[in-house]
Amino acid sequence: MNKNVDWKKYFIVLLTTATLFLTAIYLSNYLGDRKINQLKLIQDKIAIDILSSETQFSLLSELSCKNISDGALANELDELGNKLEWGQDNLGATEEVSDLKKYYSLLQIKDYLLTKKISERCKVKSAFILYFYTTKANCSECEKQGIVLTTLRDKYPELRVYSFDYSTDLSDVTAMLQIYKIKDTVLPALVIDGDVLTGFHGIEELEANIKESFKLQENLNN
Amino acid sequence: MAFLPEIILYTLVFLAMYVQIFFLVTLFENRKKIIIREGVIKLNSYPAVTIIMPSFNEEKTVYKTIRSILNLNYPKDKLKVLLIDDGSTDGTWNIISKFAKNPNIRVFKKSNGGKYTALNLGLENTETDFVGCLDADSFVDREALVRIMSYFAKDKEVMAVVPSVTVHNPKSFIQIAQKAEYNMGTYTKKMLGFLGAINVTPGTFTIFRKKVFDDLGPYKHAHNTEDLEIAYRMQKNFYKIDYCNDAFIYTNTPSTVKKLFKQRLRWIYGFLNNTIDYRDIVCKRKYGNFALFTLPTGLASIVTVCYLFTRIFYNIADFIYSKIIVYQTVGFEYTLPSFQFDLFFLNTHSYIFVNILIYSSVVFAIIFGRRMVEKKWSISYEMLLFLPVFSVIAPLWFMRAIINTILNKTPAWK
């Protein structure tokens, strides 16, 4: 029996497989880009919302506190945070995702400052936690701290958690780290009501802290 | 080095896709050669054929198997049947000895020595130019032999013809899943037949020219897979093996996961070890598509299945571990995030698209195989069972076969 080998066929199949493979990669990249664009749109919307809130705040002397709307902003920031986290895991740590993350950190700081001012001026009941973390490889306790904070946020809708990646190359984040004297060796680090807590803190301890924070603000309201 | 798992993954997935496309191109090239005959066909001449039926403790099925042979649409004077009891300890001998008076049948009883010894006893007593084997747990369709013999009549170079095997009377879910798998097997073997690259001549009624054994010698133990080894030997000696898709054999398949595991472990172990024994021909151009396609892709598929399974297993273990961490950290206070459907979170990794293509081609293979067996163009519920069931359990016998090969431990027959 003659054992002819059709090399042309082997080559054509290789070419077809490679084409399909590249098409799959192209399609994946295309949809990934669309997701990044979607993230940018959300960020732009949040930026506008913050600007709007800031403007309202500036006009506060002429407006009553009830006219200031900022509740939706927290949800939008949460949504953006979730999507960015998913994007980082699934779209790869690209430069675009990294830039979006910086922008997100900036928006969080702006929201934090603004909400804090509104809270003080309008006597709105709020509790803030600033959370500094880093990668799993460099911070074994950060994952657990994240779980505690997520649980608390679900339990107390008024609680706002602003998360900052220590490694984010953004001067504003660096400034916050300097203000609170946080080093990468003490992560995870939390700032609650001006107090800096380093290392892992369990749910019971933090819950007590939050309740304290609530009381403080409730006292201010009285 | 961080990218190494991804590089391995993409290489293996690329190979899997290459194999599927290779089959599709082969199908496209040969689409007009696939004939599915219905009803009775006639041959110009009917060469004498000997059917060897080795049996070991097959009292439940052996009678029906013999009756199916005697019922073949083939001239009775051209059909010789050798019934061999390989030292059964049940009532098999009582059943087959009752056929001793039939002028076409000869019965033999020997001490247990394994299937290949029973087959070789049959070969020693074969006087016809064509010889085949039928396992005592399988039944032949009435038209199977005449359709197989038409392939020999058409092409003098054909030295063996493999029939289409399907599942007899599937009852348990594992048998139903195997039905889809056998349909897929019909498609892939037909394509391998076109490529001249069939790697197994199963005991379910493969018919050989007697010359094969006269030239190449009798069956060997071959790691309990003598039907694989003889095909390898034939390919090495350039003996053509064809596949008759419309000659149907119905076989009893393992009814439980445990039995299926034992059977498949023996098959995969046999494939690995016979390939090791014949390593001198792997990837040698001289031996055609068998050496360039069947053997390398067969080995690659074992590696792929094991790698993907390990990866999935790792991911599942990682997920469970993360849930344990959650429980240890916050106890039962953790609330699951409320689910809101958002297309954003749909995984659009290229790996997903490639997998969709591969799975689609597997589904197509099952549908086309079913078309060749049952003449139906539709999705069957068997295939819905096959994909999840085999995705979970097949990697287990693949990995065990590798371990057994490393430990040089030959799996038992049953």
Image (cartoon, coloured by chain):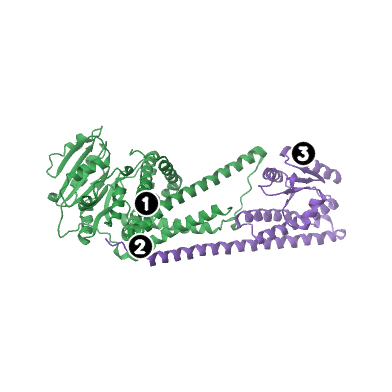
Asked whether disc 3 touches disc 2, contact meaning CB atoms under 8 Å apart, the reply is no
Q: Which residue in the protein does label 1 denote?
A: B279
Q: Nearer the viewer, residue B413 or B176?
A: B413
Residue lying at the far top of the rendered structure:
B89
Question: Which secondary structure, mark 2?
Answer: helix
Q: Are marks 3 and 2 on the same chain?
A: no
* Subunit of label 2: B
As measured in the structure, the alpha-carbon distance from the residue carrying label 1 to the one carrying label 2 is: 28 Å
Chain B takes which shade in the image?
green
Residue A208's mark?
A: 3
Q: Which residue in the protein does label 2 denote?
A: B27
Asked whether disc 1 touches disc 3, contact meaning CB atoms under 8 Å apart, the reply is no
Q: Mark 2 is on which residue type?
A: Leu
As measured in the structure, the alpha-carbon distance from the residue carrying label 3 to the one carrying label 2 is: 70 Å
Eye-nearest disc, 1 or 2 = 1
Q: Earlier in the sequence, mark 1 or mark 2?
A: 2
Eye-nearest disc, 1 or 3 = 1
State the residue at coordinates (77%, 59%): A50
* Subunit of label 3: A
Chain A takes which shade in the image?
purple
Q: Is residue B47 visible?
A: yes
Question: Which secondary structure, mark 3?
Answer: helix
State the residue at coordinates (45%, 58%): B17
In the rendered image, residue B97, in percent from the top left (x then y), is placed at 17, 36
